[in-house]
Amino acid sequence: MIKDEIPFDDIKLSVVVLFYHGERWIDSCVGSLEKQSLSRDAYEIILVDNGGSTPSIYNFKEFHNIKIISSRLNLGFTEGNNRALEHTRGEIILLINQDVVVDFFCLEKVLNAFISHPEAGVIGASMLMASEKDMGSTMTKPQYAGFYKLTRYGFARYCLRKPRNPIFPLDFVSGNGLGFRKGMLKDLNGYLFDARLFSYAEDLDFSLRIAQTPWKMYLHSGAIIHHFRDQAFAGHPGQRLRKLIRISSNRLLVYANRLNLKSFLKKLPLLVLGIPLKVGRLDGDAHFNFYKFVIAFLLIPLILLHFVLRIPLKK
């Protein structure tokens, strides 16, 4: 259901934010999107109330160039963004998570980068990890670019580096701060994310699909989003267990779908070892947690069983 849909004549960029139990983040996130160097008439903001979990989203229904999409069901990150995409007017789309503050120049730099790089199908924003104590402060422009890089174990590792050039190529782009050309999707079988993944590893699948096309993937170090991120395995033990199984089996499914059988079986031992390695040092953690590594290692048989039961996933 669309609330207060109005025509947009000169929209060049559409920003999509999916909220799920997002009361904690919505004011800071939308507030940062409202205060951008880019003309407010040049971009729209699509706010998705996923599962009816964020009632404060309707406080923004009268705002200029904001659309609100509501779903009574939790559609997951994949289908929630897929449906929001149907209501966008801009040719350039930027997906961001709910737990971010967007830098003042971010949208303008993303849009200009697509104009100056016609070969780019994807341009990601630089993601800098922040703590909640920083939310009320003025964040200065850092010297480092924050991005993800695929490891030999098949998972994406968060990296910080001083870039030689403000825009540089990537082999993986996160779903948070993901900018792309809407017209490019025709080269990806017409869809953004595989809804059957629900949440997690959809950006891995997207990146691997892009790699099979002529389109290029870049990161813009000057287009910054500050990510406060919920803990990846927060919640009670049962929630953490389900999340770990979902993330890990999704990653295996993506590689099973995108590689031929021989290549997948050859890579499988590294993919399995990558599960406890990833859990042992989550993004932003300074030290390796051996306890988490052991727990994840012991769960590998259960993860593999979950993966095998879902192997028919193919698109």
Image: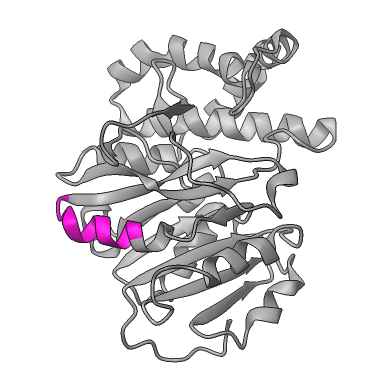
| Vertical relation: 229 (above or below) 95 | above
Across and down, in percent, residue 143 comes to: 43, 35
**Residue 173, how many percent across, how many down?**
38, 40
Q: Which residues are magenta?
A: 109-119
Residue 189 versus residue 152 in the image, above or below = below
**Does 246 sit above or below residue 155?**
below
Asked if one can make out residue 85 in the rendered structure from this viewpoint, the answer is yes
> What coloring was used for the rendering?
one colour
Question: Which quadrant does the N terminus fall into?
Answer: bottom right
Residue 146 visible in image: no
Q: Residue at x 53, y 80 (%)?
A: 67
Residue 137 falls left or right of residue 164: right
What residue occupies the far right of the structure in this picture? Answer: 236
Name the one closer to the observer, 90 or 315: 90
Q: Is residue 154 magenta?
A: no
Chief secondary structure of the magenta span? helix
Q: Quadrant of residue 169?
A: top left
